[in-house]
Image: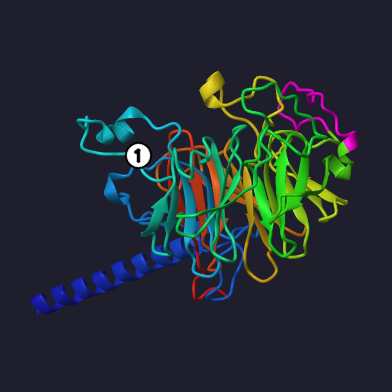
Amino acid sequence: MKKSRGMLSAIVLAVCCLLVLAAISAGGLQAAKPAKAAKAGAQALDASGMPMFKVDPFWPKIPLPNRWSMQQVTGLYVNDKNGHVWFLNRAQAADGDEIGGGDNPPRIDCCVRGPEAVELDHEGNVVQAWGGPGFADGKWPTALQTIIEDREGNVWISGTAAQDSILKFSHDGTKLLWDFGHRPPKGEPFKETNQNTDMMVSKGRFNLDQDAREIYVIQQKRVVIYDMDTGAFKRGWGGHGMPLSEITNDRIPAYKFTGGPPPEEKNMVPDLHFVEFDKDGLVYIGERGQDRIEVYTKQGKFVKEFYVSPNTPSQRAEDCGGLQETKRPPCGTTYKMVFSKEGNQKYMYVADGTNNVVWILERATGKTLGHFGSNGKYAGQFHWINAIGTDTEGNIYTGEVEQAKRIQKFVPVMANAKTK
C-alpha cells in the first residue's frame, strides 16, 4: 500500500514538472515569435516589418581547392538562371602567411595565390576559376572592383586603377572578347575633369543595361553612359540631374562631424559606390561621400533621394579615410546595394562597410526598416563589407575586404507554421 502511494506521488510530481516545463517552453516560443505575424511558409518579419535572415555557416564549401587562399571580395554577382555566384578574389593585399605556400621552396603548408575570378554553384562548390596578374596579355585589372555575368554568359570585370578598364571575357575566361579602353595616357600628365568623356581614371564601378545595350560608369561626381558594344559615349549627368557642363571640378567641402547628417549638397559627392536599376527602369546611385542614394530616370531626370544612416560620418567628413592610410575607421554608409528579387522588388539591401551591417529599406519610399549583422569576424558578422548580391530564392550573399576576406550567405528566416 505504501509502495503504491509512493508510486502515485512520483507520477503526480512528474506530471506537474512536465506541465511547468511545457508552460515555460510555450512562453519562450511566444517571446521568440516575430512581432509581425506572417503566413506559414512566408518569411518572418520583425517588429518594424523588416524581413529576417540568418547566416548559413556551412556555405561556401571551404577551403577553396588547390590550396588557393581566400582574399578580398571586392565584387560579386548572382546569376538568376542557375543561382551561381561569381566573386572577385582580389589578392592585391595578400599577407605572406596566406600565400607563402607558393614560395620556392614553400615556407608553409598552405596556401598559394589563386585565380581572382571564381564561380560557385548554388551549394557553394567551385565550378571554375581563372584570371590574375598577367592574364589577358597584361590587361588584367590591378585594383579589381566589379564582376558581372551578362545574359549570354560572358563575364565583365573591371578595376579602379588608371590603366585598368572594363574587360569582357568568354564564360570560361579563355577569350578576351572586348576592352572598353578609355584609359588616360600611360606615364603622361592627365588632368581629369567631370566634362571629359573620352578618357577617365577610374572605370571600376559600372553596371550594364542589357536591354538598351549600355554601360553606366560612375566616377568623380557623375554618371556617364556608353554604348555596350562600341564604347561610344552617349550621355551623362551630375547631381540632381545637372548637365555635365555644370558639374564643379572643385573638391566638395568637408564638414566637421558632430553627430548629425552631412550638409546638403546638389552635386554628387564622391566616392560614388554603386549604380543599380530597378524594375521600373529607374537608376539608383550610391554616394558614400554623402550617405545618400539618388534616383533618376535613364535620361538623367532627378526623381528623389534618401539617406542611409545619415548620422554616421560620411566619407566627406573631416578626418575620414581608409583604415590602411589613416589608422582611423572608415566612413560613409552606401557601399553597395541590390534589390530583392520577388515580383515587386519590395526591399533594398544596402551594404554598409562603416557600421558593418546590411540595411534593409523599402524601395518605394526609401524608409529604413532596420539592419542585420554587426562588426566582427564570426559567422554572421561583418568586417568591411564591400559586396552584396541576392538570388531568386531570397538568399543574400556578402563579400568583405580589408582583413576579413570572405564571402557569406544569409538565408530567409521562415515564419512559424502556427503563426496567423
Q: How is the image coloured?
A: rainbow
Residue at 38% x, 43% y: name it.
70
- In the image, the segment drawn in magenta is 245-264
Q: Position of residue 220 (x, y in %)?
A: 74, 34
Is residue 252 covered in magenta?
yes
Is residue 333 among what the camera can see?
yes
Q: Which residue is tagged 1?
A: 113
The C terminus appears in which quarter of the rendering?
A: bottom right
Q: Is residue 366 visible?
A: no
Main SS of residues in magenta: loop
- Give the x, y percent position of residue 145: 56, 42
* Magenta segment includes 126: no
- In terms of image quadrants, where is residue 152? bottom right
* Quadrant including the N terminus: bottom left
Specify the amino acid type for callout 1: Arg
Residue 412 lies, with reference to residue 248, above or below; the image says: below
Query: Does 367 appear above or below 83?
Result: above
Picture quadrant of residue 109: top left
Q: Secondary structure at mark 1?
A: loop
Seen from the viewer's position, the closer of residues 141 and 24 is 141
| Near-viewer residue (236 or 388) | 236
Residue at image point 30% right, 30% down: 97
Q: Nearer the viewer, residue 275 or 376?
A: 275
> Is 236 on the left or on the right of 83, as rendered?
right
